[in-house]
Amino acid sequence: MSKKIMLSGIQPSGNLTIGNYIGAIRQWVALQNDYHNFFMIVDLHALTVPQDPAILRAKTLEVAKLYIASGIDPAQSTIFVQSHVPEHAELSWILSTITKMSELERMTQYKDKALRHKMNVNVGLFSYPVLMATDILLYQTDLVPVGEDQTQHLELTRILARRFNEQFGITFKAPEGYFPKHGARIMGLDNPQAKMSKSSTVPGHAIALLDDAKAVEKKIKRAVTDSGSEIKSGADKPALTNLLTIFSAVTGRAIAALEKEYKGAGYSAFKIDLADTVNAFLKPLQEKYHSLSDKKITSVLEEGARAAHAVAAKTLTDVRKKVGLI
């Protein structure tokens, strides 16, 4: 029996964080033996907000390197750049013709981004969920690892798959979401009420996967804490809960065990140990990253695009025939 298909992707913008790794990439690595995997660098999605072309190109290669450095194996998983497979754009247009305006207007991510980019509320930002649905449906995806902020988009994908199938005949699978049980939501060091974001420009907000040791130490030292001095998690201690979650995620140790170990230690000693632990965790990933040449990554992406195109072209050929294109 052939393996089921899993697909996910990350935009090549900002700096990938330890939150991206713990909440997403690490889950992909753990699942890649069990599925036929497609992992994208979604550069077309990145264009919905202003980008410096040179930086976008550099970040695209950077994300691909970080995928591999994190443990995604090109021999097991198809790693490719979204724009290298033109079927994404064509299918997105076709699916947009069966998508209702009201469905897109309800998307909370659109509302949030529109508020943050008031001078550039473009059509691409509005129709972003249709392209995301295309990314998933084009590869007949069975499983999509998603965070809480993507559940609306996944549900729209399922709606569009069912709607197309009802109008034109069975064509697409309705994908299921995979919701990690642990470490799915790492919060900002500056604000434990907000998810750690790779696009934040606030100093000290996030630990980037490529931060050097001194930067990590500085950020953790300055991370906000709760009132009191007890190293303990709980609803009334969101900042400590976040730091303990990071500590637990990079060591595999239970939060309860960490609380016991640092009982009476104080914030300073705890933060010093956390910084040392995070740096030790990041070191092999960074070494692997720096060992990868642009030439090697370009080769991986070219091979990935060929493999992705073979699957995407088959789906699009079927779609074109069913909607009446010649």
Image (cartoon, rainbow, N blue to C red):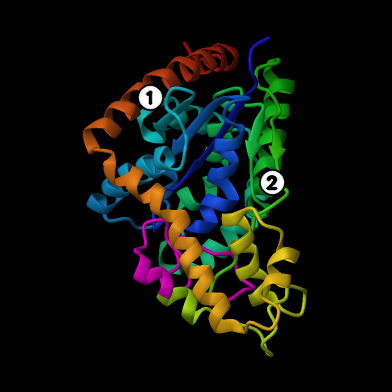
Considering the whole magenta stretch, tell me its main secondary structure: loop
Three-letter amino acid code at the position of disc 2: Pro
Q: Which mark is residue 180?
A: 2
Does residue 214 belong to the magenta stretch? Answer: yes
Instruction: Examine the rendered structure and indicate whether residue 270 appears above or below residue 103.
Output: below
Q: Position of residue 10 (x, y in %)?
A: 47, 45
Can residue 16 be seen here? The reply is no
Residue at 61%, 56% (x, y): give it.
249
Q: From this viewpoint, which residue is outermost toward the bottom?
A: 228
> Total number of numbered labels?
2
Q: Is residue 88 left or right of residue 263?
A: left
**Span of residues in magenta:** 190-217
Indicate the quadrant where residue 308 lies. Answer: top left
Mark 2 surroundings within 10 Å by alpha-carbon count, few (fewer than 14), some (14 through 19), many (20 or more): some
Can residue 14 be seen here? The reply is yes
In what element is the residue under mark 1?
helix
Residue at 68%, 9% (x, y): give it.
1
Q: Is residue 260 left or right of residue 295?
A: right
Residue at 39%, 27% (x, y): give it.
86
Mark 1–mark 2 Cα distance, whole angstroms, equals: 28 Å
In what element is the residue under mark 2?
loop
Three-letter amino acid code at the position of disc 1: Ala
Does residue 265 belong to the magenta stretch? Answer: no
Q: Is residue 220 left or right of residue 177?
A: left
Q: Position of residue 261 (x, y in %)?
A: 68, 71
Q: Position of residue 90 (x, y in %)?
A: 45, 28
Confirm or deny contact between disc 1 and disc 2 (CB under 8 A): no
Q: Which residue is mark 1?
A: 305
Q: Nearer the viewer, residue 271 or 201?
A: 271
Q: Nearer the viewer, residue 96 or 312?
A: 312
Q: Which mark is residue 24?
A: none
Residue depth check, mark 1 versus mark 2: number of the one nearer the observer: 2
